[in-house]
């Protein structure tokens, strides 16, 4: 109920209630961290405010039915930045700054920045899949002119298939 900057973090981990996770499991962890300024709406029965947060939808191109691609080749990835619609009040919309996209080939231990170009409705980047059967993790860092920001991370977003067809 107080005006101020807040950070909300959500982390979803996949787990197997029967024991160990399968070695080839994808999207083992997805996390979102939203930083936003909250100001209560006066005169509204629940002091509601829709927050100006974003979500990134990653769409790697050319994945097979197992969400894998042949390693060693460039893999185009579309990133759609989705913004809230806001119910029961409108979502504030501040100009988005240029986003940062990153990839990791070691389950998020290290990250490399991916250059991206605006294609009219999505950002397009490319990553060269590792040839050793590794996984590709993706991260999106968004900020707006107001100071609100979102960091979204998908560990093991998709797999790179090595030359003999295994993952």
Image (tube, rainbow, N blue to C red):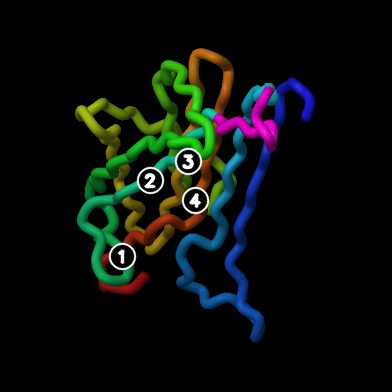
Q: Visible in this render: residue 118? A: yes
Q: How far apart are marks 4 and 2 (CA)?
A: 10 Å
Mark 2: few/some/many CA within 10 Å (<14, 14-19, 20+)? some
1 and 2 marks in contact (CB < 8 Å): no
Farthest residue to the bottom: give it.
18
Q: Residues within 10 Å of mark 1 (few under 14, many from 20)?
A: some
The residue at which mark 1 appears reads as: 162
Mark sitting on residue 154: 4
Please give the range of residues in magenta.
43-51
| The C terminus lies in quadrant | bottom left
| In the displayed structure image, the side of residue 162 where residue 62 appears, left or right | left
Upstream in the sequence, badge 4 or badge 3? Answer: 3
Q: Residue 57 carries which label?
A: 2
Counting from the top left corner in percent of width and height, residue 104 is at: 47, 45
Circles 4 and 1: CB distance less than 8 Å? no
Q: Mainly helix, strand or loop, the magenta region? A: loop
């Amino acid at each position: 109920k107080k005006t101020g900057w807040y950070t909300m973090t959500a982390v979803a981990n996949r787990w197997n209630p029967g024991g160990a996770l399968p070695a080839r499991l994808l999207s083992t962890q997805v996390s979102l961290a939203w930083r936003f300024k909250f100001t209560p709406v006066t005169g509204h029965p629940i002091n509601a405010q829709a927050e100006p947060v974003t979500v990134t939808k990653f769409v790697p191109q050319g994945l097979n039915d197992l969400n894998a691609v042949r390693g060693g080749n460039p893999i185009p990835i579309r990133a759609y930045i989705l913004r809230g619609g806001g119910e029961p009040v409108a979502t504030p919309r501040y100009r988005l700054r240029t986003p940062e996209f990153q990839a990791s080939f070691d389950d998020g231990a290290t990250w490399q920045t991916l250059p991206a170009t605006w294609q009219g409705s999505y950002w397009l980047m490319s990553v060269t899949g590792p040839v050793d059967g590794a996984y590709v993790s993706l991260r999106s860092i968004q900020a707006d002119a107001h100071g609100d920001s979102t960091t979204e991370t998908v560990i093991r977003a998709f797999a790179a298939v090595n030359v003999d067809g295994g993952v």
